[in-house]
């Protein structure tokens, strides 16, 4: 890997619906992710943060299209590839092996009729050809790594708690030691205490495996716990980006300031503040009211 | 937020020694059963005009407590006193007439609104069931309430799917408050919403509390949110109350290990507030 080339580079990415190609859902989004670093994409529902993540994985719904832009992935010795241009077969080899994804809702993303051990092993068989005892041992060590007793390999998803299911999802995603991990609101459905555990687990794995992480969230509290770099999105566009310290301690854009200000503060020193859209042009405030 | 001790102010809803046990299928193919104590001798007091937050993780019994307070689920034992009357002993029409004063706002604004009813019907249904006023009056009450929570008269004809999460929660609040209840149980009313929307809904709940002299039981797992809305806090773990006190006491001098764990899990403690 050339040291200067980032792990992932999004260049002028735009996404639109096929029916209305002129209305861009994601508009000219560019940012980079370095190996061993976490980039948080922050925004409200509808800001385009999940679409951006899905487009990296080539998982956009059929009704949507990439209107413009490049997704440059640094595939180590194989060189830099534009994921928007490569064929389905090559993409399949990267997906799950080099780039993996964790979804928001662990119950709907796990198959209820297969054991968690089988589901963790699936990508190991597909991508690395592991079988038999070798597979079994690898699944056991992955479960250990995410803090689940190895005997749980034979359990079904409904026998696990929400936090354990999300740990299984994490074990599945890191099975092939991907260089990039995409996490789409992985803790939103979880209790605060479990959220804290999952966040520190992800952070630890990222450091140990030198993974780059694209972390999607709407909560600036979570951002301050896990991010190295921050990208703030509003209505499909990036309004601000920078290092965590820059964005959190010295926000420049009024939207970033407004989002930061409406996070309830646990000391109770600052009163609650509703999100402020006063910085928008008059004719656009109506659309976001409430 | 106030520093009033737990027992000042007149009690409006008192729960004493509540016990609720569920039997759960267990073992291979679910042929066995195990008993789970969802509520194990829980006693709480809600003061008039105040907010009592019940906090704990999933499985702590806080949602069961919410449902048992309103008799949406029968108790195994214990009593729930609302202005001196034991709700657990009431049934049928007697219970229904008391229920007008006890309303609930649910967690999931996507699952708790009937997708086949338009907003006017959803909000007006309670008035219809309790036979409050003529249909013209009911219509007027619904419109007033919708406007109060930040929606418009035109929204009456729309269906729930036409609204965002925050707007749906406003509809849920309007449905609960149109009956002019005295006690509202809010079961995680903002945990399904974006952080940016949470503050708006919390502020709305606070304003309505002051205007309509409401008392809230506020169920939550998020101590960031609770700090801003609660007067008193009950911390639950595995069906038991592990600690209770005023909001200041619990945040500044948590006595129980479990409470300290909950407090230390709050995300973004290092966040500098602009």
Image (cartoon, rainbow, N blue to C red):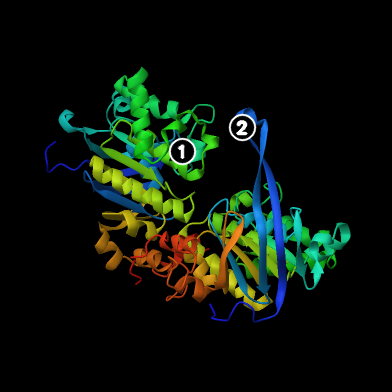
Q: Dot 2, crowdedness within 10 Å: few (<14), some or many (≥20)?
A: few
Chain ID, mark 2 = B
| Res. A48 in view | no
Mark count = 2
Query: Residue at the right extreme?
Result: B93
* In this rendering, position of residue B14 left or right of residue B3: right
Q: Nearer the viewer, mark 1 or mark 2?
A: 2
Callout 1: SS: loop
Q: Secondary structure at mark 2?
A: loop
The residue labelled by disc 1 is A19
Q: In the rendered image, is residue B100 in sight?
A: yes
Q: Is A167 in front, or is B216?
A: A167
| For residue A91, side relative to residue B58 (left or right) | left
Image height of A59 relative to A88, above or below? below
Q: Spatial distance from mark 1 to mark 2, Cα to Cα?
A: 52 Å
The numbered dot on residue B27 is 2
Coordinates of residue A225 in the picture (x, y in percent): 33, 57
Q: Position of residue A181 (x, y in %)?
A: 31, 40
| Front position in the image: B56 or A95 | B56
Q: Is residue A261 above or below residue A215?
A: below
Neighbourhood count class around disc 1 (C-alpha, 10 Å): few under 14, some 14–19, many 20 upward: few
Residue at image coords 60%, 56%: B168
Chain designation of label 1:
A
Q: Are the residues flagged by discs 1 and 2 from a single subunit?
A: no
Q: Position of residue A168 (x, y in %)?
A: 42, 37
Q: Residue at x 38, y 60 (%)?
A: A220
């Amino acid at each position: 890997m050339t040291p200067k080339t980032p792990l992932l580079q999004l260049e002028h990415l735009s996404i639109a619906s096929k029916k209305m190609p002129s209305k861009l859902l994601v508009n000219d989004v560019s940012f980079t992710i370095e190996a061993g670093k976490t980039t948080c994409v922050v925004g409200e529902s509808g800001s385009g943060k999940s679409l951006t993540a899905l487009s990296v994985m080539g998982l956009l719904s059929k009704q949507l299209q990439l209107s413009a832009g490049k997704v440059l992935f640094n595939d180590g010795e194989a060189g830099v590839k534009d994921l928007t241009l490569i064929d389905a077969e090559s993409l399949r080899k990267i997906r799950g092996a080099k780039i993996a994804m964790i979804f928001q809702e662990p119950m709907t993303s796990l198959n209820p009729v297969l054991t968690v051990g089988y589901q963790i092993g699936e990508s190991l068989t597909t991508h690395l050809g592991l079988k038999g005892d070798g597979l079994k041992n690898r699944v056991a060590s992955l479960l250990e790594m995410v803090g689940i007793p190895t005997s749980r390999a034979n359990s079904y998803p409904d026998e696990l708690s929400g936090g354990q299911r999300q740990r299984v999802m994490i074990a599945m995603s890191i099975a092939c030691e991907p260089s990039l991990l995409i996490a789409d609101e992985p803790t939103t459905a979880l209790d605060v205490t479990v959220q804290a555990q999952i966040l520190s687990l992800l952070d630890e794995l990222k450091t140990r495996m030198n993974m780059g992480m694209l972390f999607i969230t709407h909560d600036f509290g979570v951002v301050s716990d896990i991010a190295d770099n921050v990208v703030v999105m509003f209505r499909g566009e990036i309004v601000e980006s920078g290092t965590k310290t820059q964005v959190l301690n010295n926000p420049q854009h009024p939207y970033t300031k407004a989002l930061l200000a409406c996070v309830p503060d646990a000391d109770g020193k600052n009163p609650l503040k509703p999100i402020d859209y006063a910085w928008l042009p008059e004719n656009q405030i109506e659309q976001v009211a409430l | 937020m106030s520093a009033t001790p737990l027992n000042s102010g007149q009690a409006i809803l008192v729960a004493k020694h509540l016990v609720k046990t569920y039997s759960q299928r267990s073992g291979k193919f679910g042929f066995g059963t195990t008993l789970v104590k969802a509520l194990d001798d829980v006693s709480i007091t809600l003061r008039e005009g105040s907010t009592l937050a019940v906090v704990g993780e999933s499985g702590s019994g806080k949602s069961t407590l919410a449902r048992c307070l309103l008799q949406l689920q029968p108790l195994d034992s214990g009593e729930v006193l609302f202005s001196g009357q034991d709700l657990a002993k009431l049934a049928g029409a007697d219970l229904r007439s008391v229920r007008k004063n006890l309303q609930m706002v649910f967690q999931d604004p996507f699952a708790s609104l009937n997708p086949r009813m338009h907003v006017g019907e959803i909000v007006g249904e309670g008035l219809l069931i309790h036979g409050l006023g003529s249909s013209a009056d009911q219509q007027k009450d619904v419109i007033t309430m919708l406007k109060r929570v930040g929606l418009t008269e035109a929204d009456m004809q729309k269906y729930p799917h036409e609204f965002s999460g925050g707007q749906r929660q406003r509809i849920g609040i309007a449905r609960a408050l149109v009956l002019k209840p005295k006690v509202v149980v809010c079961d995680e009313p903002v945990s399904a919403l974006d952080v940016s929307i949470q503050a708006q809904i919390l502020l709305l709940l606070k304003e309505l509390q002051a205007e309509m002299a409401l008392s809230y039981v506020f169920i939550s797992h998020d101590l960031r949110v609770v700090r801003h809305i609660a007067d008193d806090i009950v911390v639950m773990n595995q069906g038991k109350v592990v600690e209770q006190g005023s909001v200041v006491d619990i945040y500044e001098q948590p006595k129980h290990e479990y409470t300290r764990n909950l407090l230390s899990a709050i995300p973004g403690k290092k966040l500098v507030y602009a």
